[in-house]
Amino acid sequence: MRLRTTAAATALATAGLTLALTGTASAADLNCSDFATRDQAQAVLDADRSDPNGLDRDGDGVACESLPTGGAEDGTALTAQVADRPQGAVAAGDGSSTQGPGVLPYAVGGLALVGAAGAAVAARRSARA
Protein backbone atom coordinates (compact mmCIF):
# COMPACT_ATOMS: atom_id res chain seq x y z
CA MET A 1 0.00 0.00 0.00
CA ARG A 2 2.87 2.34 0.75
CA LEU A 3 4.30 1.79 -2.73
CA ARG A 4 1.04 2.83 -4.38
CA THR A 5 0.74 5.93 -2.23
CA THR A 6 4.32 6.98 -3.01
CA ALA A 7 3.88 6.39 -6.73
CA ALA A 8 0.57 8.28 -6.82
CA ALA A 9 1.98 11.25 -4.92
CA THR A 10 5.01 11.41 -7.21
CA ALA A 11 2.86 11.21 -10.33
CA LEU A 12 0.66 14.05 -9.09
CA ALA A 13 3.70 16.18 -8.23
CA THR A 14 5.19 15.55 -11.69
CA ALA A 15 1.97 16.50 -13.43
CA GLY A 16 1.65 19.63 -11.31
CA LEU A 17 5.20 20.78 -12.05
CA THR A 18 4.85 20.14 -15.76
CA LEU A 19 1.56 22.01 -16.01
CA ALA A 20 2.83 24.89 -13.88
CA LEU A 21 5.86 25.40 -16.11
CA THR A 22 4.04 25.23 -19.45
CA GLY A 23 0.68 26.77 -18.56
CA THR A 24 1.08 30.22 -20.11
CA ALA A 25 4.17 29.74 -22.22
CA SER A 26 2.20 29.21 -25.40
CA ALA A 27 -0.54 31.76 -24.81
CA ALA A 28 -0.69 34.61 -27.30
CA ASP A 29 -1.84 38.01 -26.11
CA LEU A 30 -2.30 40.22 -29.15
CA ASN A 31 -2.62 43.99 -29.15
CA CYS A 32 -3.46 46.38 -31.96
CA SER A 33 0.23 47.27 -32.18
CA ASP A 34 0.94 43.66 -33.24
CA PHE A 35 -0.84 44.24 -36.57
CA ALA A 36 0.11 46.37 -39.56
CA THR A 37 -3.44 46.81 -40.84
CA ARG A 38 -6.99 46.78 -39.54
CA ASP A 39 -7.77 43.87 -41.89
CA GLN A 40 -5.21 41.65 -40.13
CA ALA A 41 -6.66 42.48 -36.72
CA GLN A 42 -10.20 41.99 -38.03
CA ALA A 43 -9.30 38.47 -39.22
CA VAL A 44 -8.20 37.57 -35.67
CA LEU A 45 -11.36 39.11 -34.22
CA ASP A 46 -13.54 37.25 -36.74
CA ALA A 47 -11.86 33.96 -35.79
CA ASP A 48 -12.93 34.41 -32.14
CA ARG A 49 -15.85 36.78 -31.65
CA SER A 50 -15.51 36.62 -27.85
CA ASP A 51 -12.52 38.99 -28.33
CA PRO A 52 -10.12 37.60 -25.71
CA ASN A 53 -7.42 40.02 -26.90
CA GLY A 54 -9.53 43.17 -26.57
CA LEU A 55 -9.13 44.23 -30.20
CA ASP A 56 -12.65 45.70 -30.33
CA ARG A 57 -12.69 48.05 -27.34
CA ASP A 58 -15.96 49.78 -28.15
CA GLY A 59 -17.82 46.59 -29.10
CA ASP A 60 -18.94 47.71 -32.57
CA GLY A 61 -17.47 44.67 -34.34
CA VAL A 62 -14.55 46.54 -35.93
CA ALA A 63 -11.08 45.68 -34.65
CA CYS A 64 -8.34 48.25 -34.09
CA GLU A 65 -10.05 51.22 -35.70
CA SER A 66 -6.93 53.37 -35.35
CA LEU A 67 -5.00 51.18 -37.81
CA PRO A 68 -5.05 51.78 -41.57
CA THR A 69 -7.11 49.43 -43.71
CA GLY A 70 -5.35 46.83 -45.85
CA GLY A 71 -6.80 47.96 -49.19
CA ALA A 72 -6.83 51.08 -51.28
CA GLU A 73 -9.47 53.78 -50.75
CA ASP A 74 -11.61 52.43 -53.61
CA GLY A 75 -11.85 49.02 -51.91
CA THR A 76 -9.43 47.15 -54.16
CA ALA A 77 -6.68 45.11 -52.56
CA LEU A 78 -3.09 46.26 -52.71
CA THR A 79 -1.19 44.54 -55.49
CA ALA A 80 2.31 45.04 -54.14
CA GLN A 81 3.37 45.37 -50.54
CA VAL A 82 6.95 46.48 -51.17
CA ALA A 83 7.95 48.94 -53.87
CA ASP A 84 11.66 48.01 -53.89
CA ARG A 85 12.48 44.33 -53.76
CA PRO A 86 15.26 43.58 -51.22
CA GLN A 87 18.56 42.21 -52.49
CA GLY A 88 20.91 39.72 -50.85
CA ALA A 89 20.59 36.73 -48.60
CA VAL A 90 18.68 36.28 -45.38
CA ALA A 91 20.33 34.85 -42.27
CA ALA A 92 18.80 31.43 -41.74
CA GLY A 93 19.66 30.92 -38.07
CA ASP A 94 20.18 27.57 -36.36
CA GLY A 95 16.57 26.38 -36.56
CA SER A 96 15.81 26.95 -32.90
CA SER A 97 12.68 28.70 -31.78
CA THR A 98 12.25 31.13 -28.90
CA GLN A 99 8.46 30.76 -28.91
CA GLY A 100 8.13 27.28 -27.41
CA PRO A 101 8.42 26.34 -23.74
CA GLY A 102 11.98 25.07 -24.25
CA VAL A 103 13.48 22.01 -22.61
CA LEU A 104 12.98 23.02 -18.98
CA PRO A 105 9.56 21.34 -18.51
CA TYR A 106 10.83 18.15 -20.11
CA ALA A 107 13.96 18.13 -17.96
CA VAL A 108 11.94 18.71 -14.78
CA GLY A 109 9.48 16.01 -15.82
CA GLY A 110 12.30 13.55 -16.51
CA LEU A 111 13.94 14.27 -13.18
CA ALA A 112 10.61 13.82 -11.43
CA LEU A 113 10.09 10.45 -13.11
CA VAL A 114 13.57 9.32 -12.09
CA GLY A 115 12.83 10.47 -8.55
CA ALA A 116 9.53 8.58 -8.59
CA ALA A 117 11.29 5.41 -9.66
CA GLY A 118 13.84 5.85 -6.88
CA ALA A 119 11.11 6.45 -4.32
CA ALA A 120 9.25 3.36 -5.50
CA VAL A 121 12.37 1.21 -5.20
CA ALA A 122 13.12 2.61 -1.73
CA ALA A 123 9.53 2.02 -0.59
CA ARG A 124 9.60 -1.53 -1.89
CA ARG A 125 12.89 -2.27 -0.11
CA SER A 126 11.63 -0.83 3.15
CA ALA A 127 8.44 -2.86 2.87
CA ARG A 128 10.47 -6.08 2.56
CA ALA A 129 12.61 -5.36 5.62
Image (tube, grey):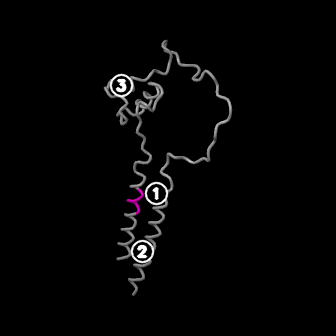
| The disc label shown at residue 97, or none | none
Residue type at mark 3: give it: Gly
Of the two numbered discs 1 and 2 on the same chain, state the one appearing first in sequence.
Answer: 1
Residue under the point 48% across and 27% down: 36
Judge whether 121 appears above or below 30 on screen. Answer: below
Residue under the point 49% across and 61% down: 107
Crowding at dot 1, Cα within 10 Å, few <14 / some 14-19 / many 20+, comes out as some
* Quadrant showing the C terminus: bottom left
Crowding at dot 3, Cα within 10 Å, few <14 / some 14-19 / many 20+, comes out as some
| The disc label shown at residue 105, or none | 1
Q: Which residue is mark 3?
A: 61
- Answer whether labels 2 and 3 touch (C-beta < 8 Å): no
- Provide the residue span drawn in magenta: 14-18
Q: Position of residue 95 (x, y in %)?
A: 60, 47
Q: Nearer the viewer, residue 124 or 13?
A: 13
> Horizontal placement of 79 versus 41: left or right?
right
In terms of secondary structure, what is the magenta stretch mainly?
A: helix
Judge whether 103 appears above or below 74 on screen. Answer: below
Q: Position of residue 39 (x, y in %)?
A: 46, 25
Q: Nearer the viewer, residue 45 or 54?
A: 54
Q: In whole angstroms, how far apart are the C-alphas of marks 1 and 2?
A: 21 Å
Q: Position of residue 1 (x, y in %)?
A: 35, 77
Q: Nearer the viewer, residue 22 or 6?
A: 22
| Label 1 SS | helix
Residue type at mark 1: give it: Pro
Give the residue at the far right of this rendering.
Answer: 88
Front position among marks 1 and 2:
1
Q: Which residue is mark 2?
A: 119
